[in-house]
Amino acid sequence: MLKQDENLSFIIEPELSPRAEQRLDLYFSIPNEMSVNPQTLSEEAYFNNHFKSHLAYNANNIHLPLVRSRFVSKNKGEQQDYRQNLNLYCYQVRLALNADIKDTLKHNEADEFYPAAMELCEQTEGLLKKLRRYTPDDEKLLPFYKNADNYLSWHVEQSFLKLLDEGPRSSDFAKERGELLDFCKAENSYREEQEYNSQSTLEDANRITNKMRLLQRLIEHGVILNRTTRHLNSYLKRMVKGTVTAVIMAFVMLVVLNARSTFTEVTATLILILGVIYGLREIFKEDITRVIWRAIVRGRPKWRFQFKNSITKDRIASQYIWLEYTSFKRIPKKVRQIFSKRRHQNKQAAQWLHFASETHVNAKEFLPGYDTLQQTVSFSLAPFARYLKRGEGKLYHLDSNKISKQAVERRYQLNLVLVFSENEHETRYERYKITLNRSKIINIELIHSQLDKSE
């Protein structure tokens, strides 16, 4: 369920059905030697900079033969309908092509790689023809089509060039390699004939790449749901701060009045006492406010996401987010038992961080052809690696009176327990060991998996 995304990030991708309710909990055991704590990394800073969550109509694990070409043929009706159907088609083609390219690159032998690549090329070419077969006549719809066609053609060319660059090479398959290169050249020539991109843009790698990223976001319009974020408890925080200030001020005024009644005249001693009183107020006001605030919000969600269809503006789902540092004794008993099964050398002093999300799907049904939503929750471990020690050590060997040395890198381990429940009667527990260094995640290993069912 949990898998690596980029060098220092991992993702979780549960699916959501109409009217579904899901809860996801993550308990991080972060070794103290990593120097991650509320003073070096606040919950708000991590949420704002290193956490992402989005929902999209489900095209996960889709492959090119499964792309629903009927979507793009719906060129009748309103402008919004055409744009959404076109975007759905292009989005599916992009994800399916990425998945199939990845699968094809798993073939290390040329006699397996090139037949799979040729089949992939044939399927891709057919899907591009279907897209271009339904070129709209309406001038208002033509810009949407050109943007989608331009991006898809460029993405297909880049994907196959990557495939040929990273795949195995063999003189026995020179003909097949030549045909794949011709396909890439044909797509490049097609975009030139259509005058999709200016010459100055084509000559600058940064400009063409950034333009295609923009077009990618445009074809995701209506497919990836629009998200709005609301910070919960903001008014409650103001009330707590105001109440604490009022109580402290009342206490200070009481002390001041008592001091004035004791000292009938203004003296240096009175001024010194008043200075100390106001100084203590400034020292303890923030500390008292912080302690009271953390006690009040413990266990309460801090943020809420609202997901809406970016075209129809219909509300599809909502998500509540918890993120807080905690102590081992506050972790649920079942999770503590899973953590306790670690080996003795792994039971080091640690900081505990708890993340939770509750997602509620409001929609009774999704777009035609889609039965689920794909939720993607992404966590970056970059702030966890910020304080890790850089550099490598050396491991010495003695072999027949000859000393040799081998460079070794410094690695760290995070332990994480994932708790996932989709209904009231089924909860899945999984423990992962994440090995990382300063620059990347080395390995993510599933250590424990358990499914609990209740009657």
Image: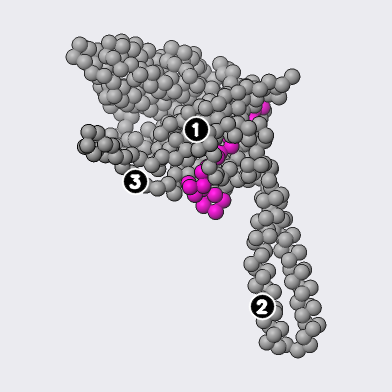
- Measured Cα–Cα span from mark 2 to mark 3: 51 Å
From the top left corner, tell me how far across and down residue 324 is, in percent: 61, 44
* Residue 362 to residue 350: above or below: above
Q: Which residue is mark 3?
A: 391
| Residue depicted at 54% across the width and 20% down the height | 77
Q: Which residue is mark 1?
A: 433
What residue range appears in magenta? Answer: 19-41
Marked residue nearer the N-terminal end (2 or 1) = 2
**Residue type at tag 3:** Gly
The answer, for residue 98, to whether it is visible in the render is yes
**Residue type at tag 2:** Gly
| Residue depicted at 63% across the width and 42% down the height | 328
From the top left corner, tell me how far across and down residue 112 is, in percent: 31, 11
Which numbered disc, 2 or 1, marks the residue closer to the eye? Answer: 1
Marked residue nearer the N-terminal end (2 or 3) = 2
| Tag 3–tag 1 contact (CB < 8 Å) | no
Marked residue nearer the N-terminal end (3 or 1) = 3
- Measured Cα–Cα span from mark 2 to mark 1: 54 Å
For label 3, the SS is loop
